[in-house]
Image: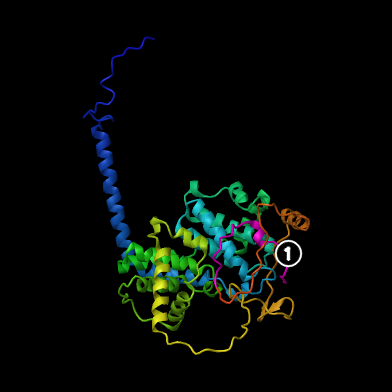
Amino acid sequence: MAFTNQPDNTFFVESDEPSHRPMNIREAAKMIARNKQEMIANELSRLACDEYLEDIMQHMRHMEDETLPDANLIDMQREIQWFMRPYLIDFLIEAHAAFSLLPETLFLTVNLLDRYCSKRIVYKQHYQLVGCAALLIASKYGDKKDRVPQINELNNMCCGLYDAGMFTQMEMHVLNTLDWNIGHPTVDLFTKLIVAEERDSAEVEHMAAYICEIALYHRDFVSTKPSIMARASLALARAIFGKPEAHDGEWDHVENMTLLALSQQLHQPSVTLSRKYSQQMYSRVSGKLADFLAQQAAINRRGAPPSPPSEPTLSKPTDVYSTPHKGLGAVPGVADGYMTPPITPDGACFGQHNAMMKDYQVPPRCPVTPTPQPTHGSGYPQQHIPVAASYFEAPTTHMSY
């Protein structure tokens, strides 16, 4: 083949001719009819929503009560302690972001996890496995099929600690324990309803979502209704940005206490969560919240009178996460009037895993469980620690169960 030195003048020449073939009359008629049907369907949906809105909200309130976890029952866990929760929530948030799942999937995952832990005793080496099973169920329930995590991907995120069959077995056991009752009106759903009604800005909505995810780390909000959490977080977000309050009715005692408790948990959020909401797609609300808290602290310092000198006293060390632990000397099997729930099943796969865990050596890439150190303050530690399955292994020192 011979090449010529003459340039091809037609390569970059733009043409006004359409690149696709012209649409014939029949295809145009089908498109017009399809658009008309879609408009009619949307209008009928809007009319039906207006007509049945009260019934829909009543059903959501009923589901909200039926699927609310009980934190007091989770207190009865023999091995699971509340200081383990932030590490698991960090892992779930990172996995949720890695697979680009819907926002409501994260809240549904935590709801399934807490409901299961309030019904079954969970070994600490299975704590992360239960979280992965809850994430699988929640993603299959509401996300697109191509977004659902694969078992091998979750296993890699768990440093290969579990067998592939254990994910499937735990997923089925969670479903059977919850009687296949998966549906739950998440806080994200109530937030969207209130935002649409009050016409809040995207910045306020992102701040409310950030506050709601901060609440996932703390025991105090495990048994809080999503509707109350959504209203309190939006009210707090409006106050942070100096927006006017929404006149949406009176506040009862529970809502006021939830708002107060939320405002006290904003000072030391998780590093993982703060990094997530520092992105532009979330209006960088984590940085704006940090600036707001710094301004409030400066105002309080200027307005506070000087404190008189006092003799130094030794304060009692507090737990780093300020969450209650089970008391000692309780009657085995009975706590707070409740009988101990059934224990996690020891199937063929789980039985082999439990026998192997005694001699299991944690891979070097998976650090051992961090022991909570006594500090003079409370809150989530600021250093970033990579989350792995070994966070839920037995601590090496200074830990008793």
**35 within the magenta span:** no
Q: How is the image coloured?
A: rainbow
| Spot occupied by residue 389 in the image (x, y as percentages of width and height) | 64, 57
State the residue position of label 1: 396
Q: Which class describes the residues within 10 Å of circle 1: few (<14), some (14-19), or many (20+)?
A: few
Kind of element beneath mark 1: loop
Q: Can residue 118 be seen here?
A: no
Label 1 sits on what residue type? Thr
Image x and y of residue 291, in percent:
40, 68
Q: Quick one: 148 or 97, which is closer to the camera?
A: 97
The rendered magenta stretch, by its main secondary structure, is classed as loop
Q: Magenta stretch: residue 392 in it?
A: yes
What quarter of the picture does the C terminus occupy? bottom right
Q: Eyeballing the image, is 324 above or below 390?
A: below
Quadrant of residue 1 within the rendered picture: top left
User: Is residue 333 in view?
Assistant: yes
| Residue 79 percent coordinates (x, y) | 69, 68
- As drawn, the residue found furthest toward the left would be 16
Compared across the picture, whether 248 is left or right of 396 comes to left
Q: Is residue 337 above or below residue 79?
A: below
Q: Position of residue 157 (x, y in %)?
A: 60, 51
**Residue interval drawn in magenta:** 379-401
Q: Is residue 335 above or below residue 103?
A: below
Q: Residue at x 48, y 70 (%)?
A: 64
Left or right: where does residue 288 sit relative to residue 374?
left
In the foreground, 144 or 2: 2
Q: Is residue 355 or residue 337 the one in the foreground?
A: 355
In the rendered structure, the answer to whether residue 266 lies left or right of residue 331 reads left
